[in-house]
Image (cartoon, rainbow, N blue to C red):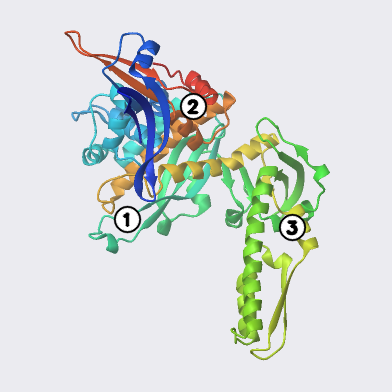
């Protein structure tokens, strides 16, 4: 939470922009920025000395609302719904829901309304969660589908490339069913969502929400979303018959094609350094499900470094555990037989390729006499680093440039990251938490998908302007653009008010220009 605070020092008041948060469970000021005295602020903003100064978040709200306005979101939704007696109309209510979800998903809507500049943009006020969700109960299944179609049409009007991808996001959100009466009695329901998204920007166009305990097959889920290139990961490849399927981009288990993993680094070429820093690829062919297919071996320097660090941490943990077991055996405090010791070793070295580089040798046969020695095979570790880390094997029947194939495959990762933020456990919804109904789950799903649609469109625009950020990073940067509200004493009429943006860093200045933010 941010606020302008005044501190009296030597009889004068100095203003600061203070950011507060919880530290060890207690509210604390975590950062503060000096703004000046009232006189200094007055000189910066002509009009005399202000009577008061306050701060509100501005950039993210203004940029998302500008994008909704450009899509003509409210009118398009109201056209779908038809004549309405309730006020505000469903178009405006849904637009506010999307704006709230995109900019402050973990903040209750009433608190959000008071802390940001939305009240300057939207009338009338919708500030209570109960009233908000009651309004969204007008979202019937038919309306949900038609609203998605209308917004998708607006998005496609802004794009030259209308090619689409079909993606599954199985970890979409967690809900509790409506028949719960106590939190302890709730059986949480994990929901997934199938999405039709643009190839350019991974912007959602249509969705199909499902309960994980009622999940359709991957192929049938995505086939119901309309014509699109199917995107899948290695764990889903076994569900598909790639020998007869057409229109796909996916990954395969690395161990399925060891001949590719041993290719020297010199066989790979750089892939569009401006879009994919540190990415190289080998474009070739291999037999997949009995058919010769185009496969692309990619190597990411960033992924390589991350996997190498993670494996080093895992290996260090495993060696510490084996060393502790060896010490216990030597001290006689571990009296297990060889079978028990072997089981413990297997638990420590199982999975994540640890067994490839870490070996343990036992000597002695009787409890109390068994000893353990462990060894890290440096040559095996070097081969693992060279052959596996940073690599993926992509398969496709599309003749797209390598960069477009990689972009299509990474769409799922971007969407999963976005939905973790938009639908995570901290996201606010109806109260109490366990009063979810199927209708509310459908409304929550629509709001979340539309928030992803708008923010991914914004991310695409920022990326085209040279700012390569994730959706969360983009919204965080925009949220850092605040608004100072200066209120001046009344001279007989209504008090005068001036607004100005807080100081911007170069990246924020670029985003403010891109989304036409000004005061």
Q: Which of 56 and 427 is in front in this view?
A: 56
At label 1, counting other C-alpha atoms closer than 10 Å, the crowd grade (few under 14, some 14-19, many 20 or more) is many
**Place of residue 200 in the rendered image (x, y in percent of width and height, measured from the top left):** 56, 31
* Residue 166 rendering spot, x and y as whole percentages: 53, 42
* Label 3 vs 1, first from the N-terminus: 1
**Residue 333: horizontal and vertical position, in percent?**
59, 84
Distance, label 2 to label 1, CA atoms, is 35 Å
Please tell me whether mark 2 or mark 3 is closer to you in this view: 3
Which tag, 2 or 1, sits closer to the chain's start? 2
Q: Residue at x 25, y 24 (%)?
A: 123
Q: Say which quadrant the N terminus sits in.
A: top left
Front one among 511 and 76: 511
- Which image quadrant is residue 331 in? bottom right
Position of residue 346 relative to residue 506, above or below, is below
Q: Of 246 and 272, which appears nearest the observer? A: 272
Label ID, residue 156 = 2
User: Can residue 225 be seen here?
Assistant: no
Density class for disc 3 (Cα within 10 Å; few <14, some 14-19, many ≥20) is: some
434 or 203, which lies in front?
434
**In the image, residue 108 lies at what x, y percent?**
30, 40
- Which residue is labeled 1 in the image? 176
The residue depicted at 37 percent of the width and 56 percent of the height is 189
Q: In this view, does 296 lie above or below 506?
A: below
Residue 199 seen in render: yes
Query: In the rendered image, which residue does mark 3 sit on?
Result: 384
Residue farthest along the left direction in this orientation? 492
């Amino acid at each position: 939470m941010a606020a302008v605070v005044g501190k009296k020092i030597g009889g004068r008041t100095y203003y600061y922009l203070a950011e507060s948060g919880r530290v060890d469970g207690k509210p604390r000021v975590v950062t503060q920025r000096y703004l000046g005295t009232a006189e200094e602020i007055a000189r910066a903003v002509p009009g005399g000395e202000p009577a008061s100064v306050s701060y509100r978040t501005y950039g993210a709200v203004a940029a998302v609302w500008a994008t909704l306005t450009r899509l003509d979101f409210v009118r398009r939704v109201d056209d779908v719904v038809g004549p309405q007696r309730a006020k505000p109309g469903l178009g405006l209510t849904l637009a506010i829901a999307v704006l709230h979800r995109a900019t402050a998903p973990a903040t209750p809507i009433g608190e959000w309304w008071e802390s940001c500049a939305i009240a300057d943009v939207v009338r009338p006020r919708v500030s209570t969660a109960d009233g908000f969700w009651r309004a969204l109960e007008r979202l019937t299944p038919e309306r949900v589908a038609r609203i998605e179609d209308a917004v998708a049409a607006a998005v496609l009007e802004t794009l030259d490339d209308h090619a689409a991808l079909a993606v599954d996001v199985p970890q979409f959100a967690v809900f509790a069913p409506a028949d719960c009466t106590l939190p302890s009695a709730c059986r949480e329901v994990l929901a997934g969502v199938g999405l039709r998204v643009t190839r350019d920007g991974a912007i959602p166009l249509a969705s199909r929400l499902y309960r994980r305990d009622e999940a359709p097959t991957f192929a049938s889920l995505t086939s119901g979303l309309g014509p699109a290139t199917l995107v899948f990961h290695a764990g889903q490849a076994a569900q598909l018959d790639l020998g007869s399927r057409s229109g796909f981009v996916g990954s395969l288990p690395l161990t399925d094609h060891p001949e590719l993993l041993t290719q020297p680094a010199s066989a790979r070429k750089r892939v569009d350094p401006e879009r994919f820093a540190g990415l190289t690829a080998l474009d070739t062919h291999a037999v997949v499900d009995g058919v010769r297919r185009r496969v692309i071996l990619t190597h990411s320097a960033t992924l390589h470094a991350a996997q190498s660090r993670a494996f080093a941490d895992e290996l260090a943990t495993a060696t510490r555990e084996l060393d502790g077991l060896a010490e216990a055996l030597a001290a006689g405090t571990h009296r297990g037989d060889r079978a028990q010791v072997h089981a413990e070793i297997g638990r420590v070295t199982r999975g994540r390729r640890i067994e490839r580089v870490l070996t343990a040798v036992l000597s002695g046969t009787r409890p109390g006499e068994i000893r353990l020695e462990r060894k890290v095979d440096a040559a095996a570790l070097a081969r693992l680093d060279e052959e596996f880390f940073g690599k993926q094997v992509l398969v496709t029947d599309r003749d797209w440039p390598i960069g477009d194939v990689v972009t299509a495959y990474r769409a799922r990762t971007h969407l999963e990251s976005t939905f973790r933020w938009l639908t995570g456990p901290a996201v606010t919804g109806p109260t109490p938490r366990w009063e979810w109904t199927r209708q509310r789950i459908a409304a929550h799903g629509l709001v979340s998908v539309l928030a992803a649609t708008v923010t991914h469109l914004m991310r695409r625009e920022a990326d085209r302007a040279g700012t390569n950020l994730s959706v969360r990073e983009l919204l965080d940067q925009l949220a850092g653009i605040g608004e100072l509200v200066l209120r001046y004493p009344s001279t007989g009429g209504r008090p005068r008010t001036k607004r100005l943006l807080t100081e911007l860093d170069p990246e924020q200045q670029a985003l403010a220009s891109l989304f036409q933010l000004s005061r």
